[in-house]
Amino acid sequence: MIEISAPVADSLKDRARVALGSRNLILVGLMGAGKSAIGRMTASRLGIPFIDTDAEIERVSRMTISELFAAYGEEEFRALETRVIKRLLKSGPRVVSTGGGAFINERTRRQIKRGGLSIWLRAELDILWERVNKRDTRPLLKTENPRQTLENLMNARYPVYADADLTVQSRDVRKEVIVNEVLAAIAGVASESVEK
Ligand SMILES: Nc1ncnc2c1ncn2[C@@H]1O[C@H](COP(=O)(O)OP(=O)(O)O)[C@@H](O)[C@H]1O
Ligand SMILES: O=C(O)C1=C[C@@H](OP(=O)(O)O)[C@@H](O)[C@H](O)C1
Ligand SMILES: [Mg+2]
C-alpha cells in the first residue's frame, strides 16, 4: 500500500500545537481586526478550547458590552475585563480573544504577557472601518465621527500592540489564510511556506 504523507496544512497545525504546548494564545488588536473570528477558527484548528473575553464578560454580567458601558462606564468595564482575563489565563492551553482595549490597560497587559503567547492582529484603517461600521455593538465608536475615532485609537494603540510576542497582518483575504498565518507564526515558520 502506498502511504500518503499528511497534508501540509495539517503538519502546520501540528507544529503550531507542539510549539504552543500548555501556553495560552492571546489575540490582541483593534476592533474589527478579526480577533473573535480568527481566534475561534484557530482554536478549532488546534483542537483546544476558545474563549472570547467580551462574550465571557457578557455571560458573567448578564449584560451586553454596550449596556455595561452605558450603566457603569468604561472604567468599570476595564476592571471587570482585568478580572475576567486574569481568571481565564490561569490554565491553558486555550485560545483567548480579547477586546481591543484589554492589552492597552497596563495591568491586563502584564497578565497577558505572563499568561501565554500574545499575537497582534494588525490591520489598516480602511479594513477595520469596513468591518466595524456594519454593526453598532461597539460603544467606543458611538461618536460623531466614528471613523476618526477609530483612527485616533489606532494612533494611540498601535505602539502598545507592537509589544505583543507575534504579529500577523489581518487583511482582505479569506479568514483561513489568516488562520494559517497565525499557526505559522506560532510554529515559527515563514508564512511564505504556508499553503494558502
Ligand atoms: N479575514 C477576514 N476577511 C473577512 N472578514 C473578516 C476577516 N476577519 C474578520 N472578519 C469579519 O470582520 C468582522 C469583525 O471581526 P471580529 O472577529 O468581530 O473582530 P474583533 O473581535 O477583532 O473586533 C466580523 O464580521 C468578521 O467575520
Ligand atoms: O477597543 C476597545 O476598547 C473595545 C473593543 C471591543 O472588542 P472588539 O475589539 O472585539 O471589538 C469591546 O471590548 C469594547 O467595545 C471595547
Ligand atoms: Mg471581538
Image: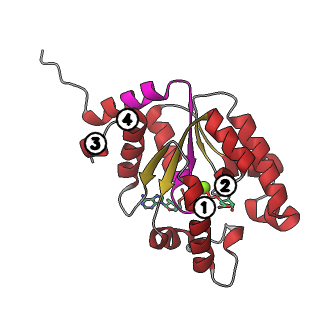
Q: Which mark is residue 188?
A: 4
Span highlighted in magenta in the image: 15-37
Instruction: Judge: label 1 CB < 8 Å from ligand 2.
Output: yes
Q: Is mark 3 on a helix, strand or loop?
A: loop
Q: Position of residue 185 (x, y in %)?
A: 40, 40
Indicate the amino acid at tag 3.
Val
- Amino acid carrying label 4: it is Gly
Measure the alpha-carbon separation of dots 1 and 3. Answer: 29 Å
Q: Residues within 10 Å of mark 3 (few under 14, many from 20)?
A: some
Please tell me which residue lies in front, 137 or 101. 101
Whether residues under marks 2 and 3 lie with C-beta atoms below 8 angstroms apart, the answer is no
Q: Which residue lies furthest to the left in this view?
A: 2
54 vs 182, nearest the viewer: 182
Q: Looking at the image, is mark 1 or mark 3 earlier in the sequence?
A: 1
Mark 1 Cα shell of 10 Å, populated few (<14), some (14-19), many (≥20):
some
Is the distance from the Cβ of mark 2 to the nearest ligand 2 atom less than 8 Å?
yes
Residue drawn at x 76%, y 59% is 64
Is there any visible trace of residue 101 in the rendered image? Answer: yes
